[in-house]
Amino acid sequence: SAVVIDLVKKVKPDIQVMFNNTSMDVADTYRIVKSHPEWIVTNPDEGFYVWSKRINFVPTRFTRACCRIFKEEASMKYFKEHNIDKLMLFMGVRNDESSARSNRQFIEHNPKWSNPNWLSCLPIRKWTDLDVWLYILREHLEINPKYRKGYNRAGCAIVCAFAAKGTWVLDQYWYNNLYNRWHNQLT
């Protein structure tokens, strides 16, 4: 995300940044967001833990709704409430992050979006992890402290079914309260 923000701001400095608060991020991420009061922050009507407990939902690799509800739907709700008819949404999605993302194009329309004038642009979709890190270091971009703790992704904490199993050890060590909260909810 930091790379895409930097790239886009070099072309259009007044671009608006949006952060979707999934209610599953760690304090390290929230501190970065709070340091940017100019960013738009979308908040869910109901936090993930309350929502998942209410409907007895556990995300797995085969059944997940987290991104759809806490990111996509939150964004669409914001765009509709603010009468945004035309939109180019820049995202840091990269093709090599997963097989599901491997065929993504530079400019796309998400068929789940209700407005055909809402497009997404993936300017770094062909970048490797090394490309991203070299850019971050060359441009002296802010680094989420979660990366310094051994994580290769800084997204949702603890509950993501798509996180590598090795992150569970990191979660238990670095974010023990969140780790225990989720595991207590599962039992």
Image (cartoon, rainbow, N blue to C red):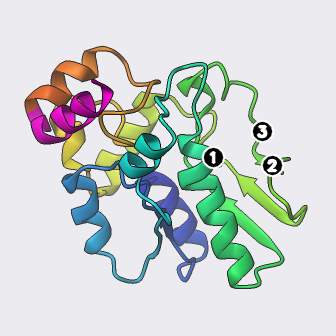
Q: Position of residue 44 (x, y in %)?
A: 49, 63
What kind of residue is marked 1? Arg
Closer to the observer: label 1 or label 3?
1
**Crowdedness near tag 1: few (<14), some (14–19) or many (≥20) residues, C-alpha within 10 Å:** few
Label 2 Cα crowd, 10 Å radius (few <14 / some 14-19 / many 20+) = few
Q: Is 180 colored magenta in this rendering?
A: yes
Which of the 4 quarters of the picture holds residue 184? top left
- In this view, 31 is above or below 136: below
Mark 2 secondary-structure assignment: loop
Relative horizontal placement of residue 61, taking residue 31 as reference (left or right): right
The residue at 20%/40% (across/down) is: 178
Q: Is residue 87 left or right of residue 7?
A: right
Residue 186: give x, y in percent of width and height.
32, 27
Tell me, for residue 146, which label it has, or none: none
Look at mark 2 in the image and give the residue it sits on: 112
Would you name the residue on which mark 1 appears?
A: 68
Vertical placement of residue 121 versus 95, above or below: below
Residue at the image point whose x is 47% and y is 35% from the top: 56
Residue at horizontal 32 percent and vertical 50 percent from the top: 25
In space, the residues marked 2 and 3 are separated at their CA atoms by 16 Å
Question: Contact, CB < 8 Å: mark 1 with mark 2?
Answer: yes
**Along the line of sight, which residue is nearer the eye, 181 or 155?**
181
Judging depth in this view, the residue of 82 and 117 nearest the camera is 82
Please provide percent x and percent y for residue 177: 12, 41
Circle 3 sits on which residue? Answer: 105
Q: Secondary structure at mark 1?
A: helix
Instruction: Point out the frontmost of discs 2 and 3.
Output: 2
